Image (cartoon, rainbow, N blue to C red):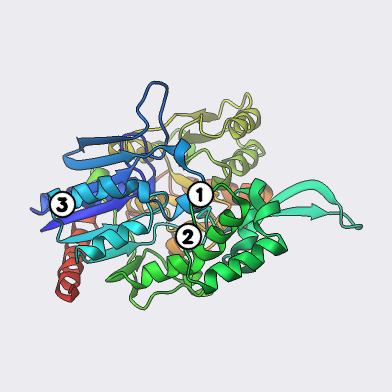
Amino acid sequence: MRVLYVVHQFFPKHISGTEQYVLALARAGRAAGDDVRVWAIDPTGRGPGEPPTEERRYEWEGVPVTSFRFDFPDVKNQVLVDWWNPRNAESFERLLQEFEPEVAHAFHLRLAGIDRLDQLERRAIPFLVHLMDFWFVCPIYLLLRTERELDAEGRPTGVVRQVQCDGPPDGGYGCFDCAHTGIAPWAREPWARARHAERRAAGAPPEDDLSGEQAGFAMIERPRRLAAALRRAAEVLAPSRTVAEALARAQASPPRLQVVPYAIDRARLERIAPAPGDAVHFGFLGTFAPHKGLAVLLEAFRGLPDPRVRLHCFGRFGTFPDYDATLRAIAADDARVTFHGAFAHAGIARALGGLHVLVVPSLWRENTPFVCLEARAAGLELVTSDLPGMTECVPVGRGRAFAAGDATALREQLAAAADDVRSRGHARLEPDRSIPDVHAQYADFRARYQVARGRAP
């Protein structure tokens, strides 16, 4: 079977959970004898001396990849390009014509555009959509809302905090408080709202125009246009109840939505080393980004008076320089804390093999972090924020939760986890064998692809 995977970014520049999952499934598909290929965009923009647009064809771990970078300086409507991007049409159409896929599986369409689905439909190619985060209901894909604290007289105090959000507030206009904040004064003025109502009544689409009016129209059209796109899929797969419920709250649930938990490549963990016995080793694996909560973990850990604990942080500095400085300042001269840098996913067993406990202190609801599943399969305990998406993937006896963002509460759970590890003589838990393997999951997806092909016109 010829299968096309569509994703918003890919290796070698981008190595987060979505990319890891797409790669693992593509490799499993090719191992099963199917011709699975990836089409992705390169969202990093062009560097000095590079052409305005660029299409690269290459292989990554045996998987053929087409990566297209469009001309970012050409974009006028920054809100619209997030979900509708005809600049990608030519590259995508060329691959469809050459490859002639029998089915497509879209894992993320941010900056790629839901108009890629139009191209698939014109060729009668059935497609599935995977909900890898909350992008279909949230332009910053985190469902976190920025709130600015006011004093008794209603004046801003300068304190800004992020709180959980359940979907586009004020019909989408409220999303400007978190995304494209500089456009907000023009995008939601009464005159602009009136023009948006006229355009919607006329059935006009948002335009790639440099104006607050068009940016606002793109934002309020976003929820209904993306929900309509999901309804066109042969099947929509949510990896957790958390994501399915988020779509339901935002009134964006498609009729053919299935909750299918993620799988992992279990072969990566077959040769994990025995747990260390010199101390209790905690770990953080992920992006050094504010919403991932590493600063909360560092603050909690620094307050532990225990000299027989260690904290290993795996991830990249450089994406959020101000946050990097905060992390380094909190860690300061604590010799118990080590920043190891990022690692190739093939080295996951080496990273987890040096740990007893994995900490996931995220400030957003997450979407079943892959590292939680891999940690369970390796026998690590989990300490997570008490937010859905994380608590959903921590079975009884596998870990504990703390109030998200509360360093004091986290410190208490770290101490309790350290006691647990010592009570077992520094042994890990029994590996959790209930998590499906990616090869078995590809076989399940292949059956779904066959059903989708049977429904295609």
> Residue tagged by mark 1?
360
Q: Residues within 10 Å of mark 3 (few under 14, many from 20)?
A: few
Nearer the observer, 154 or 289: 154
Disc 3 residue type (three-letter): Gln
Q: CA distance from mark 2 to mark 1?
A: 18 Å
Q: How many marks?
A: 3
Is 14 drawn above or below residue 440 in the view shown? above
Label 1 Cα crowd, 10 Å radius (few <14 / some 14-19 / many 20+): many
Q: Secondary structure at mark 3?
A: helix
Q: Of discs 2 and 3, which sits in the foreground? A: 3
Q: Position of residue 98 (x, y in %)?
A: 13, 48
Residue 97, which numbered label? 3
Q: Secondary structure at mark 2?
A: loop
Q: In the picture provided, is 447 more to the left or to the right than 412?
A: left
Which sits earlier in the primary sequence, circle 2 or circle 3? Answer: 3
Identify the residue at image location x=53%, y=70%.
Answer: 200
The answer to whether the residues at label 2 and label 1 have Cβ atoms under 8 Å apart is no
In this image, 19 relative to 206: left or right?
left
> Quadrant where the C terminus lies?
bottom left
On the image, the x and y values in percent for residue 138 come to 52, 59
**Residue 134 image label:** 2
Q: Earlier in the sequence, mark 3 or mark 1?
A: 3
2 vs 1, front mark: 2
Which residue occupies 16% across, 68% down? 447
- The N terminus appears in which quarter of the rendering? bottom left
Towards the viewer: 284 or 205: 205
On screen, 331 above or below 238? above
Work out how far the residue at label 2 is from the one at label 3, CA to CA, in angstroms.
31 Å
Where's residue 214, x and y in %? 56, 56
Q: Is residue 266 visible?
A: no
Specify the amino acid type for callout 1.
Answer: Val
14 vs 250: above or below: above
